[in-house]
Amino acid sequence: MDAEASPSRSVSGHLRGALRLARGAWSQAARLALDIALPTLCVACREPVSGEGVCADCWAKLSFIAPPYCPRLGIPFVYDPGPELLSMEAIANPPAYQRARAAVRYDDVARTLVHSLKYQDRTDLAPAMGRWMARAGRELLVEADALVPVPLHWRRGWSRRYNQSGALARVIERQTGVKLASEALRRVRPTLQQIGLSRSERASNVQGAFKVASDRKADIAGRRLVLVDDVLTSGATVDACARALLRAKAASVDVLVFARVVDTHKAPI
């Protein structure tokens, strides 16, 4: 019986294999047809693009931040003032966190990328943005014990369905191997949108809004942390987060964002 059944099983196996190949070929053809019918468009200029959502022209318009910059705030300098010289902003208003780094300036293209990720469900942009952040924050990440995304309040998280800072942090985790402590920091009260608020209003808006959960303090105590967010404007949000983490006995807190606002009307030093 076994000898007689063997050819039948062999034929059946070949048929199943052929069917799997046919289904795979059909699926690939369907994806190709869909790509042709609905090509990916650049998020900034809406031109067709192959890849990660930004065409070559718009990519060239992104202003990547590179040295020289303030070693504390990461604000780019017009010229190199020498090693370890801080910006006037860092001297006049030092933050709770130790260092901040950003991948790009918050210009028109960067704003479109951030808003698309944040408000338009363009999670496909997170891999490229996260990789650029990992490059910009290399010196912070090599010393880090954990990544902490800036949290949303649960009500806002429910309406948005995901946290853009968490999406970026997960990419950085995959790029660097630094573990994500996504539930360690919580936003314990809802806050107004920071857009349109003055610097002092931004600080008041987020005061006391963040807290380390009591059951997560062991994840924070004695550890070197990197806070991850999409944009740094006045720094009020990440400063409030850093204070909460330091109260929970974090060894140090650095900040890594995709884009930061750079006031070109002020002298950098």
Image (cartoon, rainbow, N blue to C red):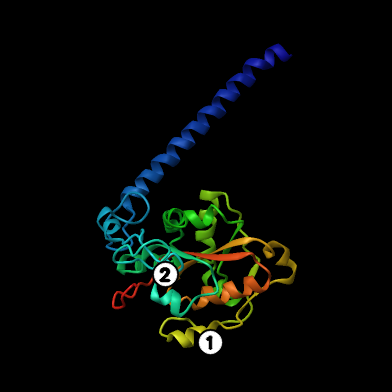
Query: Label 1 belongs to which residue?
Result: 204
Q: Position of residue 93 (x, y in %)?
A: 47, 79
Which element is circle 1 on?
helix
Of 54 and 240, the residue lying toward us: 240
Q: Is residue 11 left or right of residue 99?
A: right
Is residue 186 at all visible to an observer of this figure?
A: no
Q: What residue do we see at 71% from left, 67% from top? A: 217
Which residue is depicted at the point 55% across and 23% down? 14
For mark 2, give the secondary structure. loop
Where residue 2 appears, x then y in whole percent?
A: 73, 14
Identified at 33% across, 66% down, the residue is: 77
Q: Is residue 186 left or right of residue 117?
A: right
Residue 258 picture quarter: bottom left
Mark number for residue 18? none
Picture quadrant of residue 244: bottom right
Which residue is identified by label 2? Answer: 86
Residue 13 versus residue 69 in the image, above or below: above
Residue 124 locus on image (x, y percent): 44, 56
Circle count? 2
**Residue lying furthest left:** 57
Q: Using the numbered discs, state the Cα–Cα distance from disc 2 to disc 1 in whole angstroms.
A: 26 Å
